[in-house]
Image: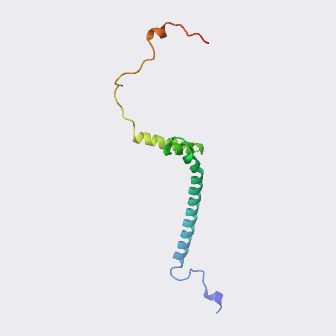
């Protein structure tokens, strides 16, 4: 009997198929985690200047500006609408002191225009 005759195409032992599946699963998992890591690192490198920019913007405002600059306006708008739907501003009555006025009615109804300089 030769060495080739004793080997069959069946997996070695009762756990051979399981080991092949396990190896394939580990390979796919490692590949997916590697891609996710590259995506996270590249995003953070790109996002850092937006977060460290001088100014008084909040983190949320800086991230939404970064997202809109990187063609993610649809996601930013969707998240803003979701936040507004969850936390609607309180509806109240009229303003206590009323609306401020800017001038008397007689000034605006006279029909005279100011002369340009």
Instruction: Specify the color scheme.
Output: rainbow
Residue 19 or residue 65, whichever sits in front = 65
Residue 31, above or below 73: below
Quadrant holding the C terminus? top right
Name the residue at 55% across, 74% down. Answer: 20
Name the residue at 53% across, 44% down. Answer: 62
Name the residue at 58% across, 48% down. Answer: 49
Residue 65 or residue 33, whichever sits in front = 65
Name the residue at 51% across, 75% down. Answer: 18
Residue 46 point in image, percent of width and height: 60, 51
Quadrant of residue 101 within the rendered picture: top left
Q: Residue furthest bottom?
A: 1
Q: Is residue 81 visible?
A: yes
The total number of labels drawn is 0
Residue 28 point in image, percent of width and height: 56, 66
Residue 103, above or below 24: above
Q: Is residue 72 visible?
A: no
Position of residue 113 in the picture relative to residue 106 (left or right)? right
Residue 34 or residue 94, whichever sits in front = 94
Residue 13, above or below 48: below
Quadrant of residue 67 within the rendered picture: top right
Residue 65 point in image, percent of width and height: 55, 42
Quadrant holding the N terminus? bottom right
């Amino acid at each position: 009997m030769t060495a080739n005759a004793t080997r069959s195409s069946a997996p070695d032992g009762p756990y051979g198929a399981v080991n092949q599946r396990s190896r394939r699963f580990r390979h796919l998992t490692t590949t997916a985690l590697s891609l996710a890591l590259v995506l996270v690192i590249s995003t953070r490198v790109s996002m850092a200047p937006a977060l460290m920019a001088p100014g008084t913007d909040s983190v949320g405002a800086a991230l939404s500006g970064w997202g809109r600059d990187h063609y993610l306006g649809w996601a930013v708008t969707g998240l803003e609408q979701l936040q507004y739907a969850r936390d609607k501003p309180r509806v109240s009555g009229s303003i206590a002191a009323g609306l401020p006025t800017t001038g008397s009615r007689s000034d605006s109804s006279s029909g005279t225009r100011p002369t340009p300089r």
